[in-house]
Amino acid sequence: MTKLTLMLLTFLMIGCAKKEVKIPTLAEKGVQEIQNHSQVWLFFEVKNNDTVAVVNRKNTISTTHWIYNIDKRLPLKAIIPAIINLQDKHANSMHSEKGMFDYFSYSDTISKKLSLLKFDGVTFETIDELPQNLVESNESKYEDYSNIALIFNQKSVRLNDVEIDKSNFKNELATLLKFPSEEKKQMLHLNFNGSLLYQDYLFYRTIINNLSGENILVNKNEFIFN
């Protein structure tokens, strides 16, 4: 495909079977126009009482940007293994091309358009248990930053060991970032419960993306814990 100007869709459908993907609905800005893209689909299904992600990437082309259309009802533990595998295929296939990125799609209720969040370069790591203090265990690696640890559970967020409600997340994080405790660049370290729904994951990630900048960095390693 060539140029894509993204329009608002609550349900994205594919093929003659009319299978649907209910994408996240968020009030956050994102990328709304890209050149040269392919579509990846992760559908919601229940098999043997388990929620599973069914992947369709039949029409992907390695020399294009990839847009990941993921059902918002899927938990992270159901989609992260597929995403890791797809990232590898996009970056390392025989025909891969530099400058082609990976994006998550969502419906932006402010602009009334379909929007994208770029996640190229992010490394997802699944772990059985979250370390007590991940930053301290890698102290030499992060000593030049003012570090902020975020732990996302299903009903709450821990922001530097202070538990806050999801509804206050944006304001609390913006306030913390506005008044850094040290004369260093700030770095956010993200840790997500594997049972967190994709809708909530993208809610947090779009907010973080829009608050980050030259002096507010986000660790490219994201941990998914049980």
Image (spheres, rainbow, N blue to C red):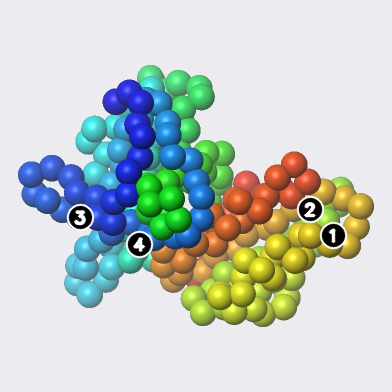
Mark 3–mark 4 Cα distance, whole angstroms, equals 11 Å
Disc 1 marks a residue whose amino acid type is Pro
> For the point 87% across and 50% down, which residue is it?
184
- Horizontal and vertical percent for residue 18? 12, 51
Q: Which mark is drawn over residue 180?
A: 1
- Decide: few, some or many residues near mark 2? Use Cα within 10 Å; few <14, some 14-19, many ≥20: many
Asked if disc 2 and disc 1 are in contact, CB closer than 8 Å, the reply is yes
Mark 2–mark 4 Cα distance, whole angstroms, equals 30 Å
| Quadrant in which the N terminus appears | top left
Disc 4 marks a residue whose amino acid type is Lys
> For the point 62% across and 66% down, which residue is it?
170
Residue hosting label 2: 186
Instruction: Give 167 or 44, whichever is nearer the viewer.
Output: 167
- Horizontal and vertical percent for residue 31? 48, 41
Residue hosting label 4: 72
Q: Earlier in the sequence, mark 1 or mark 3?
A: 3
Residue hosting label 3: 20
Disc 2 marks a residue whose amino acid type is Gln
- Horizontal and vertical percent for residue 147? 78, 58
Secondary element at tag 1: loop
- Decide: few, some or many residues near mark 3? Use Cα within 10 Å; few <14, some 14-19, many ≥20: some
Secondary element at tag 4: loop
Mark 2–mark 1 Cα distance, whole angstroms, equals 7 Å
Looking at the picture, does residue 164 appear above or below residue 213? below
